């Protein structure tokens, strides 16, 4: 899913800037309704009654006027009887007409006063029945002020003045530019997208390119994608050049590689394209088959920093390599092809399944490339970023903004606390069971191969059950403390003569039988802590190190002290600027 807060933290630190310059005046655009602003939450009963079979989306993009003219034909199968179709579409995109199964529908049969498009069926649809609705609409889609941290279109231009357009709508959702079911579980089985642009421009999209049709001074790109996340459907327009190649997977299939880039950035694009095979090898070796190998691994250069658009990841990082020798942004966004696009959270409350796993893939990649030093260095950076103010998982259905809210929700902790918790889980259950649990989460099976799995939904509860099944242990206590408590567990230490007494303390007194290693002199002992406490003989004057291999995520006073010092330094810097 989104790297928005994660990108903000790293992007600001690195002084990153986009190549493009935005041209839109966002101050004059109409406000979004609360329904359109929010994504997710409890799915309305009317939407839960149908299965989304197919979306056929047609867009004509007019960059000069910053508008789109569009039609969407959406096909559904009723899971239970229904007399209404309930869709989401920004009311600021006026609807010119609606057809039902190819026949015009009277305007009195539909309404969209607040961004929730209600289409009344002429007769009730029985379970198993099928219906198709076509919505014709257009206008100026909502413009993002600072994509990808807020959602909408980016109307920009290249250095030589050519149009450069991108959509990024994760936070607010798909309804910013097409009629959809704006829920994590609103994915269509199949999406065909037609994007019409001037012949001087290209329109890379999700999935497989079916063809390009010429008509006058314009042409239309037709793309087809299977099971895409709704927010991951994107529009990209620009004077792109294309790098293409093939990757021979360890699973026997061949994966097409595509990078759409601006001509003036050819050198950086070539370097980034050269990283594709190495990243693919890491993920396929560590996790399993690339989920969309029969479509492509695709990247498009965008006038915003980045977003995980399925098979066409948005990239605007400027082509640097980090101190670890790879492009951190591409690696993070690419991880979402597994954690977000292949396995999708059942609810936004489970967003750590996208962001926590996606973030942990970066230290793992550092370890794959350079060994333990890079791995622990990245984890240490993450550790310094934890807030621990709100639980990572609330236990109830949430909107997207509630989860990413840095002031009233977990915010960046879904990234970093999720990642650090996974490091601790790996140490607790061992590599074999840990990576087996990830494969089961991602693919729903232990033996994934191209063609024997399909995208799936999962929840926090599902992953806990997977870990319990694979390990043969009951580890709900582990996830309960790390995900459902805000505070980290604290290890109280007490010396009584030569005896070291240890006791875990959790925020709400929950059990936490986490074993802990203790180094005494040259020997490392494991204290079981089966009832949350334990003790060890430590002769006076002996070297004593608690958790010498940094296996367990726990409260550490030095971290809080450092964070407070950094806060003071930032305040001094801001005061000096005034």
Image: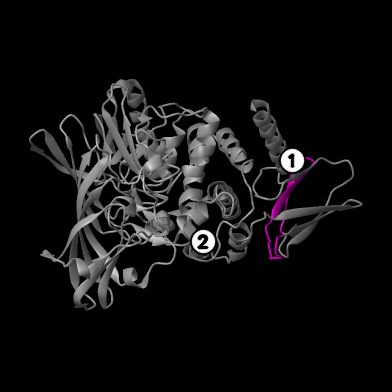
Looking at the rendering, in which quadrant would you find the C terminus?
A: top right
Say which element carries label 2.
helix
Q: Residue at x 42, y 60 (%)?
A: 40
Badge 1: residue crowd in 10 Å (few <14, some 14–19, many ≥20): few
Residue that appears at 26% across and 32% down: 238
- The 10 Å Cα crowd at callout 2, few under 14, some 14 to 19, many 20 or more, is many
Q: In the rendered view, does 415 fall on the left or right side of 478?
A: left
- SS class, disc 1: helix
Residue drawn at (50%, 33%) of the image: 11
Residue 518 colored in magenta in the image: yes
Q: Position of residue 218 (x, y in %)?
A: 13, 35
Q: Is residue 446 above or below residue 423?
A: below
Q: Which residues are magenta?
A: 506-528
Foreground: 563 or 364? 563
Vertical arrangement, residue 129 with respect to residue 238, above or below: below
Residue 282 in sight from this viewpoint? no
Q: Which tag, 2 or 1, sits closer to the chain's start?
A: 2
The residue sitting at the left extreme is 216
Residue lying at 21% horizontally and 44% vertically, measured from the top left: 208
Tell me the residue that label 2 is attached to.
467
The residue mark sitting in front, 2 or 1, is 1
**Drawn side of residue 515 relative to residue 417, left or right:** right
| Residue designated by label 1 | 561
Q: Is residue 2 visible?
A: yes
């Amino acid at each position: 899913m989104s790297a928005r807060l994660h990108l903000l933290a790293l992007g600001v630190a690195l002084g990153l800037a986009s190549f493009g310059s935005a041209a839109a005046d966002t101050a004059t655009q109409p406000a979004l309704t609360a329904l359109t602003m929010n994504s997710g939450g409890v799915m309305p009963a009317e939407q839960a009654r149908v299965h989304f079979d197919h979306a056929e989306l047609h867009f004509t993009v007019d960059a000069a006027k910053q508008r789109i003219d569009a039609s969407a034909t959406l096909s559904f199968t009723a899971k239970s009887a229904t007399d209404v179709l309930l869709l989401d579409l920004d009311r600021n995109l006026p609807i010119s007409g609606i057809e039902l199964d190819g026949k015009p529908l009277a305007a009195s049969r539909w309404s969209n006063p607040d961004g929730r498009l209600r289409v009344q069926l002429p007769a009730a649809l029985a379970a198993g029945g099928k219906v198709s609705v076509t919505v014709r609409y257009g206008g100026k889609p909502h413009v993002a002020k600072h994509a990808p941290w807020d959602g909408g279109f980016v109307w920009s231009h290249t250095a030589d003045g050519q149009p450069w357009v991108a959509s990024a709508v994760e936070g607010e959702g798909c309804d910013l530019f097409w009629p959809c079911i704006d829920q994590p579980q609103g994915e269509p089985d199949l999406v065909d997208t037609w994007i019409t642009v001037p012949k001087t421009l290209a329109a890379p999209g999700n999935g497989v390119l079916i063809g390009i049709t010429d008509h006058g001074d314009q042409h239309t790109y037709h793309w087809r994608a299977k099971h895409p996340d709704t927010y991951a459907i994107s529009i990209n327009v620009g004077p792109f050049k294309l790098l293409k190649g093939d990757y021979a997977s360890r699973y026997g299939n061949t994966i097409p590689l595509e990078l759409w880039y601006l001509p003036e950035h050819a050198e950086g694009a070539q370097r980034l394209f050269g990283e594709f095979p190495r990243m693919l090898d890491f993920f396929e070796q560590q996790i399993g088959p690339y989920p969309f190998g029969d479509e492509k691994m695709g990247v498009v250069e965008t006038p915003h920093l980045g977003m995980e658009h399925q098979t066409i990841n948005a990239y605007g990082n400027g082509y640097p390599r980090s101190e670890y020798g790879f492009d951190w942004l591409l690696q993070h966004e690419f991880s979402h092809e597994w954690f977000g696009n292949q396995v999708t959270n059942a609810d936004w409350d489970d967003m750590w399944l996208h962001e926590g796993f996606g973030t942990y893939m970066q230290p793992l990649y550092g370890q794959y490339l350079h060994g333990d030093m890079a791995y622990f260095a990245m984890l240490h950076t993450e550790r310094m970023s934890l807030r621990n103010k709100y639980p990572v998982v609330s236990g109830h259905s949430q909107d997207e903004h509630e989860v990413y809210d840095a002031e009233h929700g977990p915010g960046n902790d879904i990234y970093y606390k999720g990642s650090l918790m996974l490091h601790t889980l790996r140490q607790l259950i061992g590599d074999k069971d840990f990576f087996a649990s990830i494969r089961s989460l991602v693919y729903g099976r232990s033996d994934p191969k191209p063609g024997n799995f399909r995208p799936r939904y999962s929840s926090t509860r599902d992953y806990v059950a997977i870990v319990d099944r694979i390990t043969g242990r009951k580890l709900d206590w582990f996830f309960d403390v790390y995900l459902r408590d805000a505070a980290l567990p604290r290890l109280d230490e007490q010396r009584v003569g030569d005896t070291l007494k240890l006791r875990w303390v959790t925020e709400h007194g929950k059990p936490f039988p986490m074993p802990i290693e203790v180094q005494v002199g040259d020997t490392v002992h494991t204290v079981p802590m089966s009832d949350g406490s334990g003790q060890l003989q430590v002769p006076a004057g002996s070297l004593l190190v608690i958790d010498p291999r940094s296996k367990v995520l726990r409260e550490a006073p030095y971290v809080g002290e450092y964070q407070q010092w950094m806060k003071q330094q930032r305040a001094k810097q801001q005061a000096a600027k005034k």
